[in-house]
Image (tube, rainbow, N blue to C red):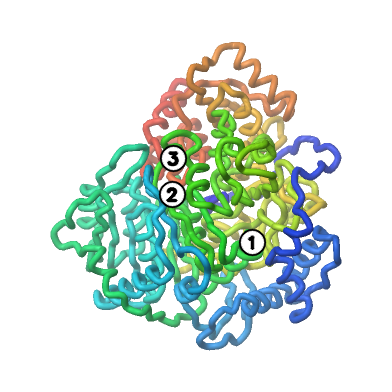
């Protein structure tokens, strides 16, 4: 999804120029009648029409049916209330005490959902005991899939929850985790939720400073850690980092040691195996609907990461909707998304348990032993739904990988991407790969490009199992998501580029930021541009067909000759060239009123940035975008810097090029390769 961090507030700006579009394109893929008929979305629609006043579906017209259902779900005369009441009933949400009303206050921020209701997220994640297949299927880098049965998962969660209570953990206390994507992380999350405590996690590839920037804000009382992890065929010892975390987190009452590399527990730490061995039946604390479930973090590129608090009830309902109705997942499915515990997609992945799917966890490099590594995990685990990043898809295309031909992926019925917009060539590559002859058999591959954010731990737009897929487009806005594109005056636009806004609340929107007692930072992050309306910081086009095009972040918008442009359009063209591995385009307003737009390129192995390649880059942008998209300079770099969750550092690099000192332009602990930023600092000095 892209997991986009909340942005610092900025004034509304003019939308980027969108390239002239031809007539509505032919669909790349359409679901067949059988898939449409069997989709959970279809069954929900019929049921909601009979029981809750949804519009009657029209036989043989799935596109009109989804559009009508979506309009009903966001209608201003109580659509949200009707939809979420129906969803709670359809999914048999177990309210231990009933709710008074669905939406007591629709104001943003501060919407009040299901007041009076009490429930528990973990209870719903563990209630499915009859589904076929294990609860978890874990693959360690280089290892064979290892199942964790539903009974085993329930017993381990019950044991750990009892031990957390014995350690004095109470509802509202925080439990931190420094763990990779392993079954122990899922167990610890569910045990924390069962107690009513608040979960928060970082991946062990985060350094101590990055973890402390996050965990110090929430003051965990228990820390679950590994001794190290394996990545790219190597072991990475993290014992010194763990020792530093223990020293620098004075609120800790206990540390739990997971010996992933086989080392003994350090002095004073508790052994994981001992804490999950009792086999206790889980006890689920019944908490209010808006009780905190977990804390996620923004990328923290311009300061301390924002500590985003989402609720047990809001996440439960939103994830049930997304996973069952939009991803069409249920018992018998095997759900794999390549992710880490430092990214919201891990939380979303674990929620696959809510719908009875087998959740596939993978700990290791996405490209080990070679670029096709993720596809091999999908093959070996029998994944039915495979999620990855758009960047991985494009890397496979460039590396001439052929998963549809060379691997048995016959069970995969959907390939989903997030993290950044999937370029048109990515759509074509996936489609072509699975229409080849080979062990995968006849192709019926649904491609779901999705977009959302850490901020809501969900999607604004993306997968709809009953709709066609068009190249370069997300299928539609999500149900009960009042997604709109707005011009600078705050007016909705269609078939034009505008700001991505959400005009009505979603249950998974943050209930607050952790260290934000008066809510000022929360309001400034999303609601300062259009008061009372969520502005996410993306340029989008909502087409008249209901599909969505993502153009890139609006806070890093390029401005040439008074016309605004999205960076994603440039990346899509430039990175299609085989010589370019990755790129970064920056627009720099200069003190004399001028404007400088350099394009930085990381080259593929054995490629050389000569005049011929520069000309090909410029010519491709001129032909496929417009003359305004042609950069002033093309500059080779060793690599493109990203946040720890994979976002290109467009805004911090822009600030550095404008003369802001590196230490003020970016939080170094939030950057994957901070040493890369020194180049831009030197470049800024040379131009001053």
Q: Eyeballing the image, is 193 above or below 488?
A: below
Tell me: 247 left or right of 171.
left
Q: Residue furthest left?
A: 267
Mark count: 3
Q: Nearer the viewer, residue 321 or 111?
A: 321
Q: Are marks 3 and 1 in contact (CB under 8 Å)?
A: no
Q: Eyeballing the image, is 258 above or below 628?
A: below
Q: Does any portion of residue 235 appear in the rendered image? A: yes
Q: Which residue is mark 1?
A: 328
Q: Which x, y percent locates residue 640?
A: 48, 32
Instruction: Say which residue appears at 73% left-offset and 58% top-offset.
Output: 35
Tell me: 174 left or right of 119.
left
Between disc 2 and disc 3, the foreground one is 2
Q: Nearer the viewer, residue 141 or 125?
A: 141
Q: Does any portion of residue 198 appear in the rendered image? A: no
First in sequence, mark 3 or 1: give its number.
Answer: 1
Label 1 and label 2: CA atoms lie apart by 33 Å
Q: Which residue is mark 2?
A: 300
Secondary structure at numbered mark 2: loop
Q: Which residue is mark 3?
A: 665
Q: Nearer the viewer, residue 395 or 647?
A: 395
First in sequence, mark 1 or 2: give its number.
Answer: 2
Secondary structure at numbered mark 1: loop
Secondary structure at numbered mark 3: helix
Label 1 crowd bin: few (<14), some (14–19), many (20+), radius 10 Å:
many
Q: Which x, y percent locates residue 195?
A: 37, 76
Between disc 1 and disc 2, the foreground one is 1
Instruction: Say which residue appears at 31% left-offset and 74% top-offset.
Output: 159
Q: Which x, y percent locates residue 294?
A: 43, 66
Tell me: 275 left or right of 635.
left
């Amino acid at each position: 999804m892209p997991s986009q961090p909340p942005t610092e507030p900025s004034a509304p700006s003019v939308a980027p120029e969108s390239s002239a579009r031809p007539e509505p394109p032919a669909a790349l893929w359409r679901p067949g009648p059988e898939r449409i008929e069997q989709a959970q979305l279809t069954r929900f629609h019929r049921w909601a029409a009979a029981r809750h006043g949804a519009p009657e579906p029209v036989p043989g017209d799935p596109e009109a049916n989804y559009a009508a259902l979506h309009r009903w779900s966001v209608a201003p005369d109580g659509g949200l209330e009707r939809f979420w009441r129906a969803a709670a009933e359809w999914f048999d949400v177990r309210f231990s005490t009933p709710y008074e009303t669905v939406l007591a206050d629709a104001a943003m921020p501060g919407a009040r959902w299901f007041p009076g209701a009490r429930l528990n997220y973990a209870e719903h994640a563990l209630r499915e005991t009859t589904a076929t297949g294990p609860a978890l299927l874990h693959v360690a880098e280089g290892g064979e899939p290892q199942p964790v049965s539903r009974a085993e998962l329930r017993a381990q969660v019950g044991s750990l929850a009892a031990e957390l209570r014995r350690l004095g953990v109470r509802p509202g206390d925080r439990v931190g985790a420094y763990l990779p994507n392993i079954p122990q992380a899922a167990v610890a999350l569910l045990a924390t939720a069962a107690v009513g405590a608040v979960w928060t996690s970082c991946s062990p590839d985060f350094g101590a400073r990055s973890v402390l920037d996050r965990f110090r804000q929430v003051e965990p009382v228990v820390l679950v850690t590994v001794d190290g992890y394996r990545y790219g065929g190597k072991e990475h010892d993290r014992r010194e980092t763990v020792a530093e975390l223990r020293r620098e987190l004075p609120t800790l009452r206990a540390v739990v040691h997971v010996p992933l590399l086989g080392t003994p527990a350090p002095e004073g730490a508790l052994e994981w195996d001992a804490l999950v061995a009792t086999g206790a039946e889980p006890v689920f604390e019944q908490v209010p609907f808006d009780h905190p479930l977990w804390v996620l973090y923004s990328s923290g590129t311009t300061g301390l990461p924002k500590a985003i608090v989402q609720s047990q009830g809001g996440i439960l309902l939103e994830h049930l909707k997304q996973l069952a109705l939009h991803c069409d997942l249920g018992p018998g499915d095997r759900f794999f998304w390549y992710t880490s515990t430092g990214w919201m997609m891990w939380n979303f992945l674990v929620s696959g348990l809510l719908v009875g799917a087998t959740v596939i966890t993978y700990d290791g490099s996405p490209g080990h032993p070679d670029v096709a590594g993720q596809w091999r995990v999908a093959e070996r685990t029998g994944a039915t739904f495979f999620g990855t990043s758009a960047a991985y898809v494009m890397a496979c295309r460039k590396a001439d990988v052929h998963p549809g031909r060379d691997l048995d992926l016959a069970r995969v019925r959907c390939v989903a991407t997030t993290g950044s917009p999937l370029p048109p060539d990515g759509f074509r590559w996936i489609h072509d790969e699975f229409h080849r002859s080979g062990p995968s058999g006849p192709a019926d591959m649904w491609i779901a490009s999705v977009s959302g954010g850490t901020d809501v731990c969900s999607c604004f737009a993306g997968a709809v199992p009953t709709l066609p897929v068009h190249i370069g487009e997300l299928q539609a806005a999500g149900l009960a998501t009042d997604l709109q594109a707005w011009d600078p005056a705050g007016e909705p636009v269609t078939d034009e580029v505008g700001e991505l806004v959400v005009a009505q609340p979603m249950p998974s929107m943050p209930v607050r930021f952790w260290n934000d007692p008066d809510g000022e930072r929360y309001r400034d992050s999303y609601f300062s541009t259009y008061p009372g309306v969520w502005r996410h910081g993306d340029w989008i086009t909502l087409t008249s067909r209901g599909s969505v095009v993502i153009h890139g972040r609006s806070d890093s918008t390029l401005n040439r000759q008074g016309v605004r442009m999205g960076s994603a359009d440039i990346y899509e063209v430039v990175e299609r060239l085989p010589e370019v591995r990755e790129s970064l385009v920056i627009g720099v307003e200069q003190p004399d009123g001028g404007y400088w737009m350099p394009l930085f390129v990381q080259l593929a192995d054995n490629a050389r940035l000569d005049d011929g390649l520069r000309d090909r880059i410029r010519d491709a942008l001129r032909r496929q975008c417009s003359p305004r998209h042609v950069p002033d300079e093309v500059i080779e770099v060793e690599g493109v810097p990203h946040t720890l969750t994979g976002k290109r550092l467009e805004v911090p690099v822009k600030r550095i090029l404008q003369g802001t000192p590196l230490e003020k332009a970016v939080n170094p602990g939030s950057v994957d390769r901070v040493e890369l930023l020194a180049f831009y600092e030197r470049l800024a000095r040379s131009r001053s």
